[in-house]
Image (cartoon, rainbow, N blue to C red):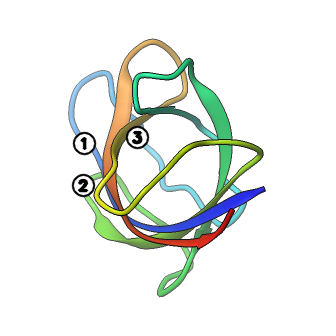
Amino acid sequence: MNKIKAKIKLYSGINKRKTPFTNGYRPLFDVLEETQISGMITLLDREEFRPGDEGVVEIKFLHANCIKGTQFLFYESEEPLGEGVVLEVLAS
């Protein structure tokens, strides 16, 4: 299991997520041009993450090759819902 701390931004606008998410949110992630992988987001400083928000979260992956500075996108379908960058690798 890989665990990272990352700064993410949840996009807002037409055809984007309209509702906030909470701890345990499991979108698909596109990391280092790998196929999309599942990960679970844990919020660190809030109860919910709303469209347009930016903040620091922890993300657990079953497997992903992440290093500090790695940029990624996250999805629920074909269109990206947000983006992020790895701040720290906590466990690998």
Query: How far apart are the alpha carbons under marks 2 and 1?
Result: 5 Å
In the displayed structure image, the side of residue 26 where residue 82 appears, left or right: left
| Point 41% across, 22% down: residue | 33
**Disc 2 or disc 3, which is closer to the eye?**
2
Q: Is residue 7 above or below residue 28?
A: below
Query: How far apart are the alpha carbons under marks 2 and 3?
Result: 10 Å
In the displayed structure image, the side of residue 12 where residue 60 appears, left or right: right
Q: Quadrant of the N terminus?
A: bottom right
Q: Which residue corresponds to mark 3?
A: 18
Disc nearer the start of the sequence (2/3): 3
Q: State the mark number for residue 12.
A: 1
Q: Are marks 2 and 1 in contact (CB under 8 Å)?
A: yes
Q: Amino acid at mark 2?
A: Gly
Query: How far apart are the alpha carbons under marks 3 and 1?
Result: 7 Å
Disc nearer the start of the sequence (3/1): 1
Q: Amino acid at mark 3?
A: Lys
**Disc 3 or disc 1, which is closer to the eye?**
1
Q: Is residue 6 above or below residue 72?
A: below
Q: Which residue corresponds to mark 2?
A: 52
Crowd rating for badge 1 (residues with CA inside 10 Å; few <14, some 14–19, many 20+): some
Relative image position of residue 67 (x, y in whole percent): 42, 57
Relative image position of residue 18 (x, y in whole percent): 40, 40
Q: Quadrant of the C terminus?
A: bottom right
